[in-house]
């Protein structure tokens, strides 16, 4: 099995780095659940993860949501390639720009996913997530603030070699355009900026877009 450079880099990260990353996600998800008043009254809670960089995240996501929701979780992890997730349960090879199988879901999470999706297809990802939700369900998309700020300045990440080197061949995420489309489609959503301090060496800043059906 030959992993992509991106997935190989993730595999080379220490377990401690994965633990710290999950600690950031925990604080982000606690905030989302509170703001969206998401309190499922049943179990297992059906959760879908849209894109996953490392196999260690699969079980960590399950444990995270079981802890936050105090419910058992049925977890499905979708990715366009799954070699890097080999051996984990509930992994499905799927292009999330097309309708999601296996729904409806109570919660869907795309954590720093959209930058890997061509800009013109990002709305399809959001629509597919909304369509796959059960009524009362939420879909969460988290984007790094630095990447969004860069998207505001250039048409394509690849136009700037230094940033391309740092982030890889990524795509602009035009969050305001996506929010306008949600408004036009009369889909309920909230969007806010998140700041997590004290876990990584530098503060983690992100934008959260949370959609409710």
Image: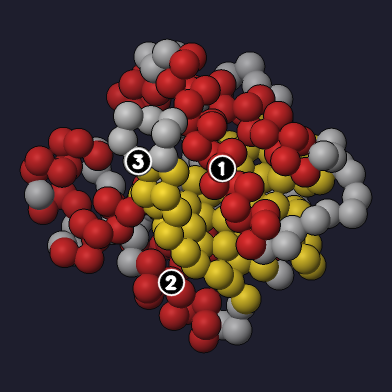
Relative to 57, say whether 156 is above or below.
below
C-alpha span from label 3 to label 1? 13 Å
Give the alpha-carbon distance from disc 3 to disc 2, as whole Å.
26 Å
Mark 3 residue element? loop
Disc 2 element? helix
**Callout in the foreground (2, 1):** 1
Q: Which residue is mark 2?
A: 178
- Residue depicted at x 54% and y 39%: 25
Question: Image quadrant for the N terminus?
Answer: top left
Q: In the rendered image, which residue does mark 1 sit on?
A: 27
Who's the residue at 20% across and 36% down the image?
166
**Mark 3: few, some, or many residues within 10 Å (few <14, many ≥20)?**
few
Q: Position of residue 31 (x, y in %)?
A: 60, 52
Q: Earlier in the sequence, mark 2 or mark 1?
A: 1
Residue placed at 52% from the left, 82% from the top? 183
Whether the residues at callouts 2 and 1 have beta carbons within 8 Å, the answer is no
| Residue 151 coordinates in the image, percent (x, y) | 24, 60
Please determine whether, in this image, residue 192 is positioned above or below residue 15.
Answer: below
Q: Position of residue 93 (x, y in %)?
A: 58, 37
Earlier in the chain: of badge 3 and badge 2, it is 2
Q: Residue furthest right?
A: 42
**Location of residue 168 with respect to 95 vertically, above or below:** above
**Quadrant in which residue 153 is drawn:** bottom left
Q: In this picture, is 46 found above or below 74?
A: below
Q: Which mark is residue 203?
A: 3
How many numbered marks are there? 3
Badge 1 element? helix
Q: Nearer the viewer, mark 3 or mark 2?
A: 3
Tag of residue 158? none
Q: Residue at x 41, y 40 (%)?
A: 197
């Amino acid at each position: 099995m030959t992993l992509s450079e991106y997935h190989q880099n993730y595999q080379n990260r220490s377990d401690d780095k994965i633990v710290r990353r999950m600690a950031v996600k925990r604080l982000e998800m606690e905030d989302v659940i509170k703001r969206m008043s998401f309190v499922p009254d049943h179990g297992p809670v059906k959760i879908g993860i849209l894109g996953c960089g490392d196999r260690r995240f699969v079980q960590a996501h399950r444990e995270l949501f079981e802890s936050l929701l105090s419910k058992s979780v049925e977890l499905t992890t979708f990715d366009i390639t799954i070699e890097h997730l080999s051996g984990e349960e509930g992994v499905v090879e799927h292009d999330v720009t097309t309708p999601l199988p296996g729904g409806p879901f109570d919660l869907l999470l795309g954590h720093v996913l959209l930058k890997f999706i061509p800009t013109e297809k990002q709305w399809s990802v959001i629509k597919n997530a909304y369509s796959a939700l059960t009524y009362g369900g939420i879909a969460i998309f988290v984007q790094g603030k630095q990447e969004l700020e860069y998207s505001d300045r250039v048409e394509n990440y690849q136009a700037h070699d230094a940033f391309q080197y740092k982030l890889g061949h990524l795509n602009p995420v035009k969050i305001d355009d996506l929010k306008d489309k949600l408004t036009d489609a009369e889909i309920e959503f909230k969007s806010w900026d998140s700041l997590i301090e004290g876990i990584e060496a530098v503060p983690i800043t992100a934008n959260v877009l949370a959609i409710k059906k």
